[in-house]
Amino acid sequence: MQLALRSGWPIYTLQRNLFDTPLRTVVYLHGGAWVNEISSQHWQLAAQIAARARVRVIVPIYPLVPFATAAEVMPTIVELVAEQVTPDHSVCLAGDSAGGQMALSAALALRNDHDFVVSRTVLISPVLDVSLTNPLIDAVQDPWLTRVGLLEFAKRWCGDLPMTDPLVSPLGADLTGLGPLTLFSGTRDILNPDARSLAEKARAAGVDIDYHEQPGLVHVYPLTPTREGRAARATIVDCLRATT
């Protein structure tokens, strides 16, 4: 593991062998409702991706609410990803929950502002619309997330940005021209209705999307120590593995 600083952020790089030259970089954005620090489950997944997919994994430790907002954090994320791009080196994004929102928003910004298509974006139970206004959310019996709590954190993350801005709510954006998406969601997650909407919208826009929905499973189930979690992590490694 290597550590660098950027604008005061710790930026960690994980790589199976520091003497290798990986053909792909994955930028992983951790979840935690924009207010929680990275956890051991995030590090374990990042390490698994680096070791088994044989890619370089970059993990930025971005500033959190209430000390920063999306308008302050997202441009640095986008720049960090853009700097990894070379003609012979592909770049992917991955993130869970709030980090999934950041990953998809970054992919959209890279398409719009840098004319760059991310090779693949992996979204684990992402926040897709910070307003949480999807009426189907009411029917979800989520043992973990609450709409009231998540909405309060989302408001602080938005700052002066409207909740419809793609920088915080990528579900409302035009998805045309995005690279392939891999999406995981459990049906006992209040974010599941929006995940289904994203899958439908991506297909309609001609985006290659691999949607994995697990009945009865909870928020960020791929990070859990379960049979389904292990299977999901294996799928993530497979889809991020660099090929010659």
Image: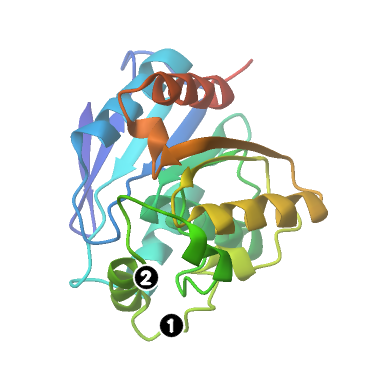
Q: Answer few, some or many: residues within 10 Å of disc 2's Cα (few below 14, many 20 plus, some between 14 and 19).
A: many
Nearest the eye: 227 or 95: 227
Q: Which residue: 48% across, 26% down?
A: 232
Image quadrant assignment for residue 158: bottom left
Q: Which residue is mark 2?
A: 70
Residue 163 visible in the snapshot? yes
Nearest the eye: 117 or 218: 218
Q: Which residue is mark 1?
A: 161
Decide: is 223 above or below 33.
above
Real-space Cα distance between discs 2 and 1?
Answer: 8 Å
Q: Earlier in the sequence, mark 2 or mark 1?
A: 2
Q: Position of residue 157 (x, y in %)?
A: 32, 72
Element class at badge 2: helix
The quarter of the image holding the C terminus is: top right
Q: Position of residue 93 (x, y in %)?
A: 49, 42
Q: Answer few, some or many: residues within 10 Å of disc 1's Cα (few below 14, many 20 plus, some between 14 and 19).
A: some
